[in-house]
Amino acid sequence: MVNKFLFEGTVVPELERALDVQSARHRVHANNIANVNTPCYRAREVSFETEYRRHLDRHPKPSALTHEDHIPLGRRPLDRMRPEITFADSRRNDSGLNNVDIDHEMAELAKSNMRYEMDIALIKKRFKLLRNAIRGRS
């Protein structure tokens, strides 16, 4: 019961899912970069935000929110949501070998890395707050 209250009723599952998504993006972009010179390779991308938005829209927001962009508690189940890997659009790179744009992939890899680091920092902060609450500190 305590475990459910502390972890499932908080933003921890959302942050955990965000880490999963960023990890998947990192793997996909690294794979795209590795295949930049592979003839006929089709670049891949990760989609998750659209499905996550649909999930949020299907589950009504609790009325206690102070701002419409806040993530409310109690929206479940996120466990069934997974990042989806699809083929990227038909963009072409300068070589004409395939549709991997190295500049785009490097930028997306850097963006994914920054988001991953931010998510890790948020999880660390959340657990620090929980540890301090258990110890009776503020």
Image (tube, helix red, strand yellow):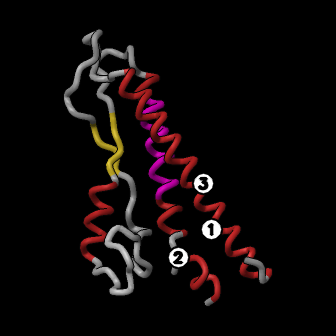
* Local crowd size for mark 3, using a 10 Å CA cut-off: few (<14), some (14–19), many (≥20): some
100 w.r.t. 1: above or below: above
Q: Which residue is mark 3?
A: 120
**Nearer to the camera, 117 or 80:** 117
Q: At which x and y percent is residue 35? A: 41, 21
Q: Quadrant of the N terminus?
A: bottom right
Q: Which mark is residue 64?
A: none
Residue extending farthest to the top is 95
**Nearer to the camera, 13 or 24:** 13
Describe the element under mark 3 as helix, strand or loop.
Answer: helix
* Local crowd size for mark 2, using a 10 Å CA cut-off: few (<14), some (14–19), many (≥20): some
* Local crowd size for mark 1, using a 10 Å CA cut-off: few (<14), some (14–19), many (≥20): some
**Image side of residue 128 versus residue 67, left or right:** right
Q: Which residues are magenta?
A: 18-31
Q: At which x and y percent is residue 37? A: 38, 14
Q: Mark 2 touching mark 3, by CB under 8 A? A: no
Q: At which x and y percent is residue 96? A: 25, 12
Q: Is residue 93 magenta?
A: no
- Residue type highlighted by circle 2: Thr
**Image side of residue 69 versus residue 116, left or right:** left
Q: Mark 1 touching mark 2, by CB under 8 A? A: yes
- Residue type highlighted by circle 3: Ile
Residue located 43% across and 33% down the image: 29
**Image side of residue 62 versus residue 110, left or right:** left
**Nearer to the camera, 64 or 15:** 64
Spatial CA distance of label 2 from label 3 is 15 Å
Residue extending farthest to the right is 135
Q: Which residue is mark 2?
A: 10
Residue located 51% across and 69% down the image: 13
Q: Which residue is mark 1?
A: 126
What predominant SS class does the magenta segment belong to? helix
